[in-house]
Image (cartoon, rainbow, N blue to C red):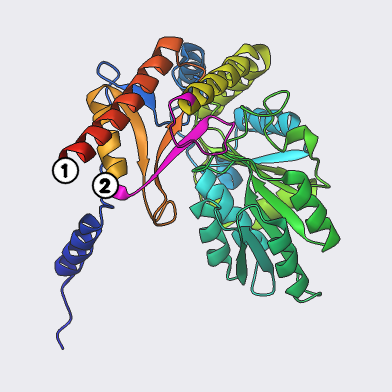
Amino acid sequence: MATRDWPSRLAERGEAHRARGLWRQRRTASPDTAPLDFAGNDYLGLAGDPRLAEAMARAARRLGAGGRASHLVSGHLAVHEALECRLAELTGRPRALLFSTGYMANLGTLQALCDGETRVFQDRLNHASLLDGAALSGAPSRRFHHGDLADLARLLERAPAEAPKLVVSDGVFSMDGDVADIAGLAALARHHRAWLMIDDAHGLGVLGEQGDGCVGRAHGVEDVPILVGTLGKALGSGGAFVAGSQALIDHLIQFARPYVYTTAQPPGVAAATLAALEILAEEPERRARLTRLIARFRAEAAGLGLPLAQSHTPIQPLVLGENRRVMAWAERLTRRGLLVGAIRAPTVPRGQARLRITLSAAHTDSDLEALLEGLTACRAAERSSAAEVTP
């Protein structure tokens, strides 16, 4: 039997993907014509803040546009060191270590810590980077039912007593918006002599008394030895970090391949993040406004009968179920100048396709009203179409 050529293989897979309603398309955004963005992760409205842009520009003029080399060669600059110290302070950890992206932070950490003897236990709804990191490490991995501590306990009890164990979870789940039971996970991990790793990508900057996330100072190194955070969401810049003990960070510097073999973060990005952290500390009203927007959206959406999930974070999914239904709602909203994420399998389980609505402190009251009006129009259009086909 002849081997199919590569173009045929790609075409067949693409056609099958389209047929299932799963084809993804990029949108080229323009600041002059951008729709109201309810799809991104700029939770505090810092990505467009001129103070971040100016800090980035000043650092680039002084230090250059690129990192030039890896941190272990000649790329680690004073601005990187300052940022790592500030992130350690924010999260209440002895040290922090910068990575190029959140994906690389998770891959690097899991690859550096785990091997074939390690047993990894992951929430079923963890981010893809956590699942991929465990697979890359070669460690046997089990997934417990979402947020189900009893299921996790059963899995931990069945694991070999002598095996190193690592429990891994999102802090805020990126597609559902709910928050992990950090205290419950920490107690189970301690009981079974396991370490706990939390990826707080969507909580950092938003949750916590000081924007230190759902882990932060509330749960120290004893509870959560490994804390991952990203800088391109609420903090509006780019990159990621791992925070923890001196021993953890030393280990990652030696053994985390995505850290060792990656060019250092551009100095301008690090400077912009430092500016964002200053704003985070000095302008708590951004978090307060975001909290009010979330509460208003949930109250008014519930009044409209929209299918809300149990989320009190900026991530507000409306689970519509079918791919075609989600895409139809998203297209109607786009025509009204509203950009909302249309999320389908495999990002979420089959049959749970959804609109992933995200709120930002940068949204005005009129922005929120436009969103609610658009969702009301989507539901009305759907009902009208259903009535037309009813005999």
Q: Quadrant of residue 218?
A: top right
Q: Give how far apart the Cα atoms at labels 1 and 2 are.
A: 17 Å
Q: Which residues are magenta?
A: 303-323
**Does 3 sit left or right of 76 as displayed?**
left
In this view, which residue lies farthest toward the front?
391
Q: Relative to residue 279, is residue 183 depicted above or below? A: below
**Residue 342: percent from left, percent from top:** 35, 40
Among numbered discs 1 and 2, the one appearing first in the sequence: 2
- Amino acid type of the residue that numbered disc 1 sits on in the rendered structure: Val
- Crowd band around label 1 with a 10 angstrom C-alpha radius: few (<14), some (14–19), many (20+): few
- Which marked residue is nearer to the observer: mark 1 or mark 2? 1
- Crowd band around label 2 with a 10 angstrom C-alpha radius: few (<14), some (14–19), many (20+): some
- Amino acid type of the residue that numbered disc 2 sits on in the rendered structure: Arg
Helix, strand or loop at label 2? It is helix
Residue at the (39%, 54%) spot, across then down: 351
Helix, strand or loop at label 1? It is helix
**Residue 98: percent from left, percent from top:** 60, 40
Q: Is residue 307 magenta?
A: yes
Can you identify the residue that label 2 sits on?
324
**Quadrant, the C terminus:** top left
Q: How many dots with numbers?
A: 2
Can you identify the residue that label 1 sits on?
389
**Quadrant, the N terminus:** bottom left
**Does 308 sit left or right of 372 as displayed?**
right
In this view, which residue lies farthest toward the bottom?
1
Q: Is residue 149 magenta?
A: no
**Residue 201: percent from left, percent from top:** 58, 39
Q: Quadrant of residue 357?
A: top left
Residue at the (76%, 57%) spot, across then down: 195
Residue at the (65%, 55%) spot, across then down: 168
Q: Quadrant of residue 206?
A: top right
